[in-house]
Each structure stands twice: as C-alpha cells, then as structure tokens.
Amino acid sequence: MNIVLKLVAQRIALGILLLLAASVLIFVGTNILPGDVAQSILGQSATPQALANLRAELGLNQPAYLRYLEWLGGVLHGNLGHSLTNGQDIATAISGRLANTLFLASVAAVIAVPLAVTLGLIAVRYRDRWPDKLISAITLTSVSLPEFLLGYIVIYFLAVKFHVAPSVATIYPGMSLLQKLHAVILPALVLVLVVQGQMMRMTRAAVLNLMQSAYIETAELKGLRPFLIIARHAFPNAISPIINVVMINLAYLVVGIVVTEVVFTYPGMGQYLVDHVAKRDIPVVQASALIFAAVYIGLNMLADVVSILTNPRLRHPK
Amino acid sequence: MNDELRYLAARAAAGRLNRRAFLGRAAALGATSVAANTLLSGAARAAGPKNGGTLTMGLGGGQSTDSLDPALAASQVPYMYLQTAGDRLTDVAPDGSIMMKLAEEVSSSKDAKTWTFKIRKGVTFQNGKPLTADDVKQTMERHSDKNSKSGALGIMKGIASMKVDGDNFVVELHTANADLPYLMSDYHLVIQPGGGMDDPMAGIFAGPYKIKHFEPGVRIVFEKYPEYWDKDVGHYDTIQMLVINDSTARNAALQSGQVQMVNSVEPRVADLLKRAPHMEVAVTSGRGFYCFNMFCNTKPFANNDLRMALKLGIDREELVKKILAGYGSVGNDMPVNKAYPLFDDTIPQRTYDPDKARHHLKKSGYDGKIVLLTADGAFSGAVDAAQLYQQSAAKAGIKITVQRAPNDGYWTEVWNKKPFAASYWGGRPTQDQMYSTAYISSAAWNDTRFKDPKFDKIIVEARGELDKAKRKEMYREAGMIIRDHGGLINPMFNQFLNAFDNTKVAGWEANPNGDMMNGLAGVLCYQA
C-alpha cells in the first residue's frame, strides 16, 4: 500500500508543479496580447484623456514580474482580485459561472459516459455485424458535425418546430433543480452527441484488443455467455485506456464548450472567459485560465491514479 | 361595412382577435391594408395600453464585462438597461425635438452661453430619496472631472462652471452652444443619487424600472418602480433582458416563444423572419452609417482628386442592396442624413460614375495600389463590402487591395491608425455633435485627419446660432465641404432591425435616435 501512496503523492506534486508552470505561461500570454486594456474597456468612443486616467488607475505602469508575484500571492491567499471592467469580485463571479459549467458538464457526463461504454461493449459483442456498424455510423456522424451545426439542428427541430425543450438555456440562482434540468436538455443533448463518439470508439478498441487473449478463449470454452465475458473478464482489464479517454472528454466538457454555450446562451465559464479576453480584463482571464488548467491537470492526474490502482503491473513497478 | 370593421378593430385591440386575422378579414370587407392598419392603431389607442405582465427580450450586444456605472456604457445592452432603469435631464423625441425628463424646463441666456435647467419636483430615486439639483450637479461633475473615465467626458469639456440655484441647475459655457439640451441627453449622463460619487455601480437611478437582478452578459431583471413621475409609461410589471449574442439563437428564441422581442435582426434573415407566423420586423432608419475612412494628411490620400476618384468609384446602390439586403439608404459622403434636425435634403446625391472617377484618378497622377483594411468587426459585412468596392473601383482603373485585419484589436490597431480602413459611426443627436466629435481639426477621433479652418469656423459659429434658418444654411455649407473635400467615403446608412411577436407585444413606435425605440421598448410597449 505504501508504494501506492508514494506514487499518488508523486503525481500530486507533479500536478502542482505543472500548475505553477501553467500560471507563468498564462501570465506571459495575457501580457503579450495585442491591444490595450484601457482602450478595450472604453471602446471606440474613448478620449485620450480618459484612456490615460484608466491606465494609471489599473496600475499598468508597474513592471511585469512585480505584477506576476502580486497576482500569485493573491491567488495563494484565495484572492483573485476584482474585475477591471465592472468591478465585480472575481471569486464570486467565477464561482457562479463555474458552478453552471460543472452542472452542465455533470448532466452531460452522467448520460454520456455510461452510454458510450455500453454502446462500446455492444459493438464488441456484435463485432462487424449490423449493430456494430449502426453504432459506429451514428457516433462518427455526430462527432464529425461541428457543435454549432448540431446545436442549430437540435434547436430547429426540438425548440422551434416541436416545442419539446427551450432553445435558451439560461439558468440562474433561484431555479429549482427540475427547472434547471429542463433548461439544459438541448445543450446536454448536443454535448452527449459530441463526446460519446471518442469514448465509445476507445471502449470498443480496448476491449477488442483483449478479446484475442488466451484467458478470454478459456472463458469462451467454459461456455460463458458472450456478453458476460466482455463485461466481467475483458472490460476490467481495459479500464486503464478507457478511463484516460473519459477524463480527457470530461475535461473537454468543462473547458471546451464555449461554442455550445454561445448557441444555447448558457451562462458558463467559456463565454465568461471570451468576453473578458475581448475586453482585455486581465485578472479575470488569468483566474479563468488558471481554473481551466487546474481542471485539466486534476482530471488527468485522477486518470493516472485510477490507472495505477486498477493495474497491478503499475502498482508494483520493478 | 364600417361598423363591422370598427367592431373587428376593437376586438383586435382588446387582444381577442390577432392582428393578422384582423387584417385578413378587413381585406375581405374591402378595406385597404393602410386604412385597416390606421383603424387598428386608432382602436388600440382608444382602448389604452394594458398594464401588467412580463416582457422578455432577447438582446445581442451584451458582455459579462458590462458595468452598472453609466460612465462606462458603450454597447447595446448597457444602453438598454440604462434607458429602462434611468433618466437623464432631457431626451430626444422621435421627431428630433427635445423632450423634458428630469428637467422640467430649460432656458438659455440670449448668447446661448448660460443655460438653466429647472429640476422636476416630486421625483424620487429608487432608494426613496428625493431628486435635487445637487444630485444633478454632482452627476455632471463626476462625468466632467478630468480624471473621469466617462464616455461623456468629451462633450462636457465645453462647460466652464456649474451651480445650483434653488431648484435650478445652471450651466455656464466657454463658448455659445445652442445644442446644450441635446448634449444633456447623452446616454452616459444618467442622473444618480449624489452623482454616483460614492458608488457609481450602485444601480440606483430615477427611471421607470428598478433593477432587481443584474448578471452582466446573462440576464437583467427589472421590476416597475411605482413612484415613477410619469404615469403614462412603464406598463409591464416585470421586464427581463436575456443576453443572446448569437443571431440564430436570438431568432430561434423569438420563434419558439421564449422571448417576445429581439434586437439586431440580420438584414439577410429579416425577410424570412417576416414570413413566420406572428412575427413583425420593425425597420427604423437612423443615423448610423458604415464607411471607409481616408487620412487627408497621408499620401496618396492627401490629394483631393484621388479622394474624389475613390468617392466616385464606389457603387452605393449595390452595397445597400447586397450588404444591407435593402435595409438602408445610400450615403452622400457626409456623416449626416435627413434623420438629423436642420438637415438640408436638397444637397445633390453622389452616384457611381466610373468615367468621372477615372478622370479624377488621372488628374491626381497616382496609379499605384491602394491598400484598404477591413474586418468583420468593423461593421457587419465589411469584408464583403470591401470586395465589392474593389470590383466597382477596378472598373474606373483604381487598384484597391483588400487586406483583412483581425476583429480582435481592430479598434485599437487599425481604426484611426491606418490611412484607409472600414469603420462605422452610430450617429449623434445633432449635426454639431457629429461634426465636433470627428470632423473638426481638434477632434480626438478625427478619423479622416480632416483639417480645414473654414469648416471649423462654420461649426463653431453654427453652434451659437439661435436662428434656425441661418443655422440650417450653415450646416449645408459645412456638409458640402466634407462631401467634396473630406476623407469620408460614406456609401450607406444602416437601419435598426428589431422584431417582436405581434400577438404578445403592442405599442411599438419607430424612434430614429437608437436601436429598440431608442432603448425604450420595454418602457413604452405593453401586452397585446
């Protein structure tokens, strides 16, 4: 058990180091964005005088490394600062948006992950027969279509034509869970269609790979039912690659869905980040980017840990 | 027949017969559609607006960076929420005249240098505090402070001093300005308690609706402020603005009934939307225009013959037809049109003339390439417009090279920096303000680098001229100078395209001063 603890601790330390490196990259990246914060905030109609005043107020005259250290210090104390553009406390504003993003991601994940894995296993069971081909055709189509197009198709049929679900998925505090679930039907559907393809393909490939093994043959010779062999004997040994793909897709559901957010007017992190990049609201951009980096690194770390735990060979390295 | 029509109109006005059905039955009874429409709006007025209910709007032009501080407002959604929640001293009426808001009366000294605004009595802010002349003075001080971030700082510069005299707010100007009541209608100058000095983002104003929830870039919810001084407006109990920046999503929300009203309908989908059931597309001509700016002090544009060649080499009709899908009007290389007060519409219209353009090009002696910068962010369709311009100019022998710039940073890196670029202006309430903002020599945003002492002199003199006929003549002269010597190529004025569900919303009135009935759609409309 000790060796597992050590491995996990190593992963976590590595993750933190990676996050620190990401924070430097984020800071440098936001500082070399072309354009000027003050001009972006005040827009086309800003007078030179107003611009100069705003620049001084924002402390843009300090050297970059000082600003980085100050920012990092603030982050470590849980203080993300205030938005330059509308003065809101960033931590408060982001926590609302992050909660929304996590809500939509969870709804999509709760449907997509079991669905993709089940479909993958069914595809293996009926390999090269019509269920396999049908599943592959459908998932590949939905993965190949761009998200906004899927969104528009879903809106046209399910919202405008048949009034099944709302096209505007705006959720806000004060809505009941049921109301929220009703609001996100369409974006969740689109996200499920987008992410399940890759997970299903990986499940299929990883399990198929094992189906050639000698112990599967033994199980077949024992007369076990084919689906039982796949689910009981093949799948547990294929978890490691599957979990990796699942985690990457979960991370995508959190950090990569800005297009879906725009199409369905969903108040998540993506739109929030894009708005603030356009306005050069640097503290918000940095905070959002850092959270995204943390989610990505965190989920990948989790995938590593799960892989280690489920694979005796990794648990006892020589 | 007339009795039956009138009965039907009354039923339609009371909401028991929808508009389309009414118009259909009126046509069956032999009434022309114009007569039927007139009858219907007459009946609606007689029945009076209905009070109560909720209006939900889907609006483009809002970001999560939007602020409640009126000084920082710069896009459509902030404009809308400030108009809904706040009031200024004055506003501009749809016909271009001045409308009194928090000022009850305005008067000036004979030389138009001292202006007195009588503050309306019995007005309270949404926190219950009564409005005083001091609040007005402090508001104006905040916007005119030289360290202010206000978008109105530029127009406050002409003010020499301000004081409070009982219920009056008195402004002393450096030089005469007959348009001061118009300047006070600027959308940044929303009156706040204590001028918003302590907390500019408090969101407390003296308008007809009080902000209940404010989630920038997502949704803003208002409830009626029952103590509002003007009882003729504010019919809905609740107004909800949903920020929907994607145009397709906005139209879908309207058609699926999640919102009852939207702004910024794309010209190319307007005709399709019109054909959908219950949808009404409201088209309003305004003062905004899409343009190409040349720097008059930079080669090769320093030569007026070359500028003239470029002005004659653009096919305005084609651009209005293809870029605006017909929802606009041709421009005349001036920043003003007939939507402005004191505009002289006898000024001859410039048209596409490749032969004349070729003549001027030859006279200028320039035959090299001309680089035109453009981006979709400059105005909707700016890249296509630049390419059409390139083709029409090529027929006159003018070699334009279209160069596409990124949207991100266009207003900081290209506009007002590069000598030939696409741009737009939203217009201003008066000709003086438009010219003073961007065309006089000292203007901070002189985006054509046009410097002409004679022109400057006319603008300053016209500003202090109280005789309207004389003033109109002066603006004609100023307009002609810009048209024939300036660096502005103005091929088209765009229109505001809004849409609403006419079975749910009534009371729409065109207002050329801004999008969505000058931002007052929520305040003036009511349940159908």
Image: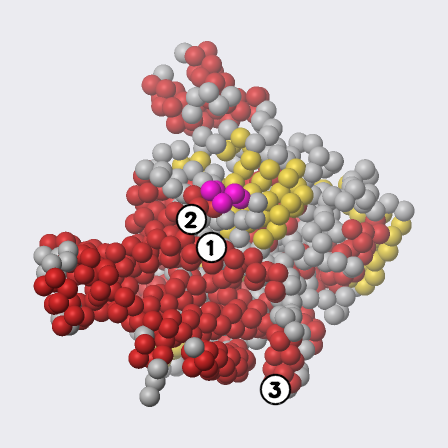
Q: Which residues are magenta?
A: A175-179
Cβ–Cβ below 8 Å for labels 2 and 1? yes
| C-alpha span from label 1 to label 3 | 36 Å
In the structure shown, which secondary structural element does the residue marked by tag 1 occupy?
Answer: helix
In the structure shown, which secondary structural element does the residue marked by tag 3 occupy?
Answer: helix
Q: Position of residue B306 (x, y in %)?
A: 42, 75
Q: Is residue B214 above or below residue B227?
A: below
Q: Residue at image x 72%, y 37%?
A: B228
The amino acid on which the numbered mark 2 sits, given as a three-letter code, is Val
To which chain does the residue with label 1 belong?
A: A
- Residue B93 visible? The answer is no
Query: What residue does disc 2 label?
Result: A184
The amino acid on which the numbered mark 1 sits, given as a three-letter code, is Phe
Q: Residue at image x 57%, y 21%?
A: B47
Please state which of residues A233 and B348 is positioned toward the viewer in this rendering.
A233
Cβ–Cβ below 8 Å for labels 1 and 3? no
Sequence-first tag of 2 and 1: 1
Which disc number belongs to residue B471?
A: none
A235 displayed left or right of A52: left
The amino acid on which the numbered mark 3 sits, given as a three-letter code, is Tyr
